[in-house]
Image (cartoon, helix red, strand yellow):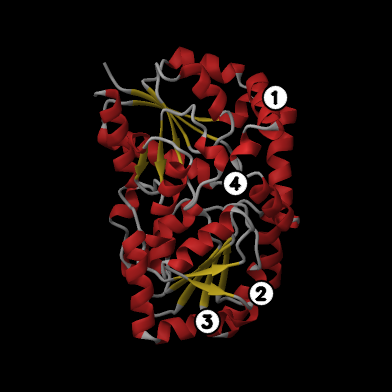
Amino acid sequence: MSFRVAILYASVGTGHRTAAMALEKWFQKEIPDSKVLCLDTLSFSLPIVRGVYTRSYLEMVRHMPHLWGYFYETTDDPETRNGVIATLGELTEKLNIQKLKKTLLFFSPDAILFTHFFGAAAIAESFAPDIPVFYVNTDFLSHVFHRNPAFSAWFVSSEETLCQYLADGLSPERVFLTGIPVDPAYVSPPGREEARERLGLDIDERIALVMGGGIGVGPIEEVVRSLHEGGFATEVICGINEKVRGVLLESFADRPGVRVHGFVDDMPYRYASADIIFMKPGGLSTSEALCSGTPIVITDPIPGQEQRNSDYLLDRGAARALFDYRLAAEKAHSLLSSRNEKARVLRAAKRIARPMAGREIVRKVKEIKGQ
């Protein structure tokens, strides 16, 4: 009988879905006869709930990031999790995921994994411990909402995250340090020459990759202008933010050295083709970039989870930070012209990169289920 696993994410941003898709591939790779059901929990909620939940997050991070940071930080304590906000949140989940429960019961999974907390607590209360429900962290530090004791076990991204769980009194036998799951392609990423040939890029160009995150926010235009004027061919990824993409296409229409893209599905080649990456510190995207062997410069982290990710990467020496967007080219030239500095950043990135995180998660799930 095949192993059946349900992987659930919430379509808030893109990182949670990307992590879920990566886990799906790892299950199929490690357990060839496995049956994987990958679902967006928000798609099972009422349209008004789905719209408010998604739109409120996107509007805050795009237009009021400090308000989002305040919400994220002030709710990050056990009293809040067990208080009014958590009670209302769990009630909303329970009222809006009955269809999800029915779908899971019909599928009859051997294990359930979440990469976002929406609906996770209610599902854990309904299915665990008979069917283990696991939580997979997709940032380098944890929020208290991720550490609900109802989960059977957790897969965490860093030593600091592990310490957060243990400080909450959770059993070390239920918390596993694996890293953030990335696509199996990052185990053996393409080389620079292969990537450029695949993307049709000049092998001799000095290329900067600029990313605004999956939802396309941040000071992209200023960074691109500096890099272009500083002599870099610039590849720009705007994610799902078509408004930003349109502005950039208009602003740089007469500059052939600037190529603007929306959402792309060939990121291993994008990372590998670049000489340097300017990016927001999303947990999933930076986990991918750490595997690529290309130096990272962090731009404009959103207060909250991205600021914590940024602090983690900078503390490890695995990235550098851009403080003045107008000086992006100077930052890039400085880092790339110093062989020792570049080598230090790449060594630090390699130390914390976890390209096999997905495989570790799958094998631990199998072990816990006795498969």
Q: Which residue is mark 1?
A: 46
Q: Secondary structure at mark 1?
A: loop
Q: Residue at x 51, y 17 (%)?
A: 126
Whether residues under marks 1 and 2 lie with C-beta atoms below 8 angstroms apart, the answer is no
Disc 3 from disc 4: Cα separation:
28 Å
Residue 354 to residue 251: above or below: above
The answer to which of marks 3 and 2 sits earlier in the sequence is 2
The answer to which of marks 4 and 1 sits earlier in the sequence is 4
Disc 2 from disc 4: Cα separation:
23 Å
Q: Secondary structure at mark 4?
A: loop
Whether residues under marks 4 and 1 lie with C-beta atoms below 8 angstroms apart, the answer is no
- Amino acid under disc 1: Leu
The answer to which of marks 3 and 1 sits earlier in the sequence is 1
The answer to which of marks 3 and 4 sits earlier in the sequence is 4
The answer to which of marks 1 and 2 sits earlier in the sequence is 1
Question: What label does residue 331 carry, if any?
Answer: 3
The 10 Å Cα crowd at callout 3, few under 14, some 14 to 19, many 20 or more, is: some
Q: Which residue is mark 2?
A: 222
Q: Secondary structure at mark 3?
A: helix
